Each structure stands twice: as C-alpha cells, then as structure tokens.
Amino acid sequence: MNSANLPVSPIRLTSFSHGGGCGCKVAPGVLSEILRGVRNFPVPKELMVGIETADDAAVYRLNDEQALIATTDFFMPIVDDPRDFGRIAATNAISDVYAMGGTPIMALALVGMPIDKLPLEVIGKILEGGESVCAAAGIPIAGGHTIDSVEPIYGLVVMGLVHPARVKTNAGARPGDVLILGKPLGVGVLSAALKKGALDAAGYAAMIASTTQLNTPGRRLAHLDAVHALTDVTGFGLLGHLLEICRGAKLSAVLDMAAIPLLTDVARLATAGYITGASARNWTAYGDDVALDAAITTMQRALLTDPQTSGGLLVACEPVAADAVLEVFRAEGFAAAAVIGHMQSGPAQVTVRC
C-alpha cells in the first residue's frame, strides 16, 4: 500500500508540528493536575456547566428561554492538504456545541502560523477550509486572532444557543442506559499511517469524510427526554470520554468490542503497528479504571484509546429510545451509528467484553 493518488500539497504541513489533530491534547492525568488548583473558584449561579465534569463546553443561562454555549478548540495539522486541515479543525471545534445539544450561531478564528515558512496562499487555503465548514453549519466567522508561531495552529471559538431545559451534559447517564456511538473509530490510526506513507486514497477519503462531518444530530437529540448524557469522542479516545460519563454519573459502563464500528481498513493498519503515541499516553492515564476481557488484543486496546479528531457523538439513552436515537443519526447521514454498550450501577470504570 502507498500514498499514491492522495492530495498533493506543495508543503507538508505535518512536518511543522510535533503532533496533529486531537492527538496534540495534553494527557488526561496531566490536565487534571493542571486544573486542580482552579476548580474551587467561585462561579455565578447562571453558569450551568463549567469545568466540574470535563464537559465539552461551558453553558451560561441568559434567560428562561436561552442559554449560551461557549467553546474553543484548535490544534496542529493532522493532514498536509491545507484546505482539508482547515475543514477538519473547524468541524472539530463546532462539534462541542452540538455535543451540548445546541445550535451554533457564530465563530471566531484562532490562527497561529510560521509566517516566514508558510506561503500566504497556503495559510489562505487553511482559512478557506474553515470558512467552508462554518458556511455549511450556517454560521459566520465574525472575527478572531492571529499570531506568528513556530508551529501551524488553527481552530475556532464557537458560540451557540440552547434552551436551558434542553442542555445535554456528559454527567446525566442512568443505570440501564444504552450507549450509542455516532461515528466509527480509527482516525488516529489512519493519521499515523498517513504520516508514514502507508495510507491509500480510499483510507484518506474515509478519514476526511469522517472528520469533516458535522455532528448535527446533537441538535435533535436535545429534544429527546430519554437522552440522558451526550458528549463527543476526541483526543482521549472512546475509553477516556466514556470514563468522563461514568465519573459524572457515578456509574460503570460495559462495552461490547465487537459492536464498535471502525473506519475503513483501520483494524489491519492497527495490527500492522500504525498507532499514535497519544494512544499509549491515554492508556497510561486511565487504564487502571478499565477492565478488559482476557481475549481483548493489544490492537483492540489501542483502538479503544485511539485519539479521535472530530470524532462522533457518544449518547447514553433509555433502551426504549435507542431506535429513535439511531433514526436521528441515520436521517443526518451517520450510517455507521451503533449501540456499543450500556451503563450500570457500580464504581466509575469501564469493562470491555469481546
């Protein structure tokens, strides 16, 4: 396999950065240590969601009908094509608003570029890619901030609105809820293969299709009372973000490994060793809270911790609502959405079964 027929960029954007996409995230354990000293700051009563449960965005109640969602996300290039990089980064940032059940209304661009090394037309294509995704989401880029930096960085501040009674957090799961994943896993694996010239055109197309698909089902899921918790799967991998749901609800989760959807050719590439360093860092950070069946392979464990850039929504809902949730995903173009496990009483940990 080779990288023939992939988009050709005059400059390899990934060569400027030490890591790409959501794999750039600070490891979960390190992040917890950093935030430990700021969790006790006083907050206004209008702040409905802050940093307490590591949720996807902050939510501030404006009035009885509206709450403001505010979030930001940015990272270094995960691909070399500048327009694709901009599209992926923008999609990833907007996802946090959908993950709270909201509708995005406006974005601000965050841009850091090595001005002396990247041609202005390349930078322009990155911004153009981000603008195209914002246009698809129906929002303007109303401003932003730029700096001259050593590594290319692009992302967005995104704001959205949601009814205060319809806010979906990552902390509301209940015993017996089923877990539904909206997108297949494997973005980190595909990006690792891309960097080493082992990703073919079909694999690249699958990666771009997944990472640029807006998580629009979140808006409709907000109107389903049977949806108890919602988040998106990004840099900490499926296990990491599911553990956040478990900790928020003080419950355990059980995953069915065979039911978890994967992107094109991901299992083979992972078996061949195309694994990101962030996958291992994720396992080190939270592996003590995960129980794996003896038959779970090293490759499968790596997929469970694989950092997802612009990954899918993870939903906890009543079993009777599973079909309705899946229908929302199908109607929005998420054909791979699947039930992958359930919540149960017990300590905040995840059990993975074959």
Image: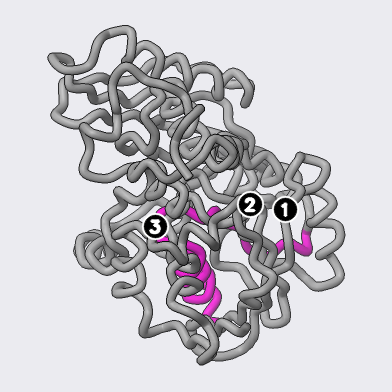
Q: Is residue 165 above or below residue 9?
A: below
Q: Is residue 212 above or below residue 320?
A: above
Which residue appears at 62% of the width and 55% of the height?
Answer: 184
On the image, the x and y values in percent for residue 294 come to: 51, 92
Residues drawn in magenta:
225-251
How many marks overall? 3
Counting other residues with Cα less than 10 Å from the Cα at mark 2, is it few (<14), some (14-19), or many (20 or more)? many
Q: For the residues marked 1 and 2, what is the alpha-carbon distance in whole angstroms?
A: 6 Å
Magenta-colored stretch includes residue 235 = yes
Indicate how the structure is coloured in the image. one colour
The residue type indicated by label 2 comes to: Lys
Q: Nearer the viewer, residue 117 or 64?
A: 117
Question: Would you name the residue on which mark 2 appears?
Answer: 183
Magenta-colored stretch includes residue 212 = no
On the image, the x and y values in percent for residue 51 come to: 38, 57
Q: Is residue 164 left or right of residue 158?
A: right
Q: For the residues marked 3 and 2, what is the alpha-carbon distance in whole angstroms?
A: 20 Å
Q: Nearer the viewer, residue 29 or 52?
A: 29
Q: Secondary structure at mark 3?
A: loop
Question: Would you name the residue on which mark 1 appears?
Answer: 336
Q: Is residue 305 left or right of residue 263?
A: left
Q: Nearer the viewer, residue 178 or 22?
A: 22
Q: Is residue 85 left or right of residue 208?
A: left
Q: Is residue 86 left or right of residue 24?
A: right
- Numbered label attached to residue 274: 3
Which of the 4 quarters of the picture holds residue 337? bottom right
Q: Secondary structure at mark 1?
A: loop
Which residue appears at 34% of the width and 20% of the height?
Answer: 144
| Whether label 1 touches label 2, CB < 8 Å | yes
On the image, the x and y values in percent for residue 332 come to: 77, 40
Which of the 4 quarters of the picture holds residue 174? bottom right
